[in-house]
Every structure is written in structure tokens, then in C-alpha cells.
């Protein structure tokens, strides 16, 4: 569908053509020389008007084309600038991503190395606790043995002293 402006331009283009056609039809009907001159003048002026309108339309078309091309140039330049900015951002983000990936890889490697070490450490702690418990048990036994030996010796000395006292009495 044509917009009202396009319809108006179409009518303006058609009206001079219609005038030229109408003048040709009238010319055949009326063969008088005065009318012929008038008709010819009308046809020439209509043709000139038609050409002027066509030139104006062509000029406006060129202006619109130039404006559109200028706008497209600005859009392309803006697109290029945005692409450059995006590349710069990617360059800024990529090193961070690479650094993060490297750090994650190092963390994973260390975790893999630490897992068996952690298990070994837990095993050694368990063995240490068992050994410490055994050591404490042995120390208790030794202390009890020393106490019992000490008591035996004391008892022996007491008995000797007691015998000595009885022999003295």
C-alpha cells in the first residue's frame, strides 16, 4: 500500500501525463489553429511540469539515498568500534580466564597429591595413638612393678629391722 505522500506524488506525476493525453484527444476533436496552439502550449507546459516533478523526485531520491548511505556509514563505524571494544574486553577477560584455569589446575594437582598424604597422615596418627597408648600402658606396668618391688624391698627391710630389734631385745 502506498502512503498518502506517495499517492500524492503519484497523482502529481499522473496529472501532467493525463493532461498530455487529454490534450491529444482534444486536439483530434478540435482542429482549430488557435486551439492547437493553446493545446500545444498546454502540452509543453504539462510536459515541462512533468519533467520538473520528475527531476525533483529524482533529486529527493538522491538526497534520501545520500542520507541513508551516510547513516549506514555511521552505523558501520559504530559497529566497528563496538567490535574493537568487544575484542579489547575479551583480551582483558581471557588472561583472567587463563589465570583462573591455571590456578584450578594447580589446585586439582595439589589436591590429588594431598589426598594420599592425608590418608598417610591419618594412618600415622592412628599408629601414633596406638603406640602412645601402648607406651602409657607399659609405663603404668613399669610404675606398678617399681612400686611393688619397692614395697617388697621395704617389707624385706622392715622384716630385717624387726628381726634385728627382736634379737636385740
Image (cartoon, grey):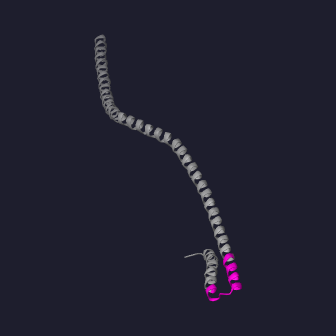
The percent coordinates of residue 148 (x first, y second) are 29, 23
The percent coordinates of residue 110 (x first, y second) are 39, 34
Give the magenta range: 26-44
Residue 60 lies, with reference to residue 113, above or below; the image says below
Residue closer to the observer: 58 or 134: 58
The percent coordinates of residue 78 (x first, y second) are 59, 52
Residue closer to the observer: 111 or 157: 111
**Most common secondary structure along the magenta stretch:** helix
Residue under the point 67% across and 79% down: 40
Q: How many marks are shown on the rendered structure?
A: 0
Residue 66 lies, with reference to residue 118, above or below; the image says below
Q: Residue furthest bottom?
A: 29
In the image, is residue 33 part of the stretch drawn in magenta? yes
Q: Quadrant of residue 101?
A: top left
Residue under the point 65% across and 64% down: 59
Q: Residue furthest top?
A: 168
Residue closer to the observer: 47 or 60: 47
The percent coordinates of residue 91 (x first, y second) are 52, 42
**Quarter containing the C terminus:** top left
Residue closer to the observer: 108 or 162: 108
Amino acid at each position: 500500500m502506498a502512503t498518502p505522500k506517495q499517492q500524492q506524488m503519484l497523482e502529481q506525476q499522473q496529472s501532467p501525463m493525463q493532461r498530455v493525453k487529454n490534450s491529444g484527444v482534444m486536439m483530434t476533436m478540435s482542429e482549430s489553429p488557435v486551439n492547437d496552439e493553446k493545446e500545444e502550449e498546454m502540452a509543453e507546459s504539462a510536459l515541462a511540469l512533468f519533467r520538473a516533478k520528475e527531476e525533483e523526485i529524482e533529486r529527493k531520491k538522491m538526497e534520501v539515498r545520500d542520507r541513508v548511505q551516510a547513516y549506514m556509514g555511521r552505523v558501520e563505524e559504530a559497529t566497528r568500534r563496538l567490535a574493537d571494544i568487544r575484542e579489547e574486553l575479551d583480551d582483558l577477560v581471557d588472561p583472567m580466564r587463563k589465570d583462573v584455569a591455571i590456578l584450578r589446575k594447580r589446585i586439582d594437582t595439589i589436591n590429588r597429591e594431598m589426598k594420599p598424604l592425608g590418608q598417610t597422615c591419618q594412618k600415622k596418627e592412628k599408629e601414633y595413638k596406638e603406640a602412645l597408648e601402648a607406651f602409657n600402658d607399659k609405663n603404668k606396668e613399669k610404675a606398678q612393678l617399681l612400686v611393688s618391688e619397692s614395697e617388697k624391698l621395704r617389707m624385706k627391710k622392715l622384716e630385717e629391722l624387726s628381726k634385728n630389734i627382736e634379737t636385740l631385745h
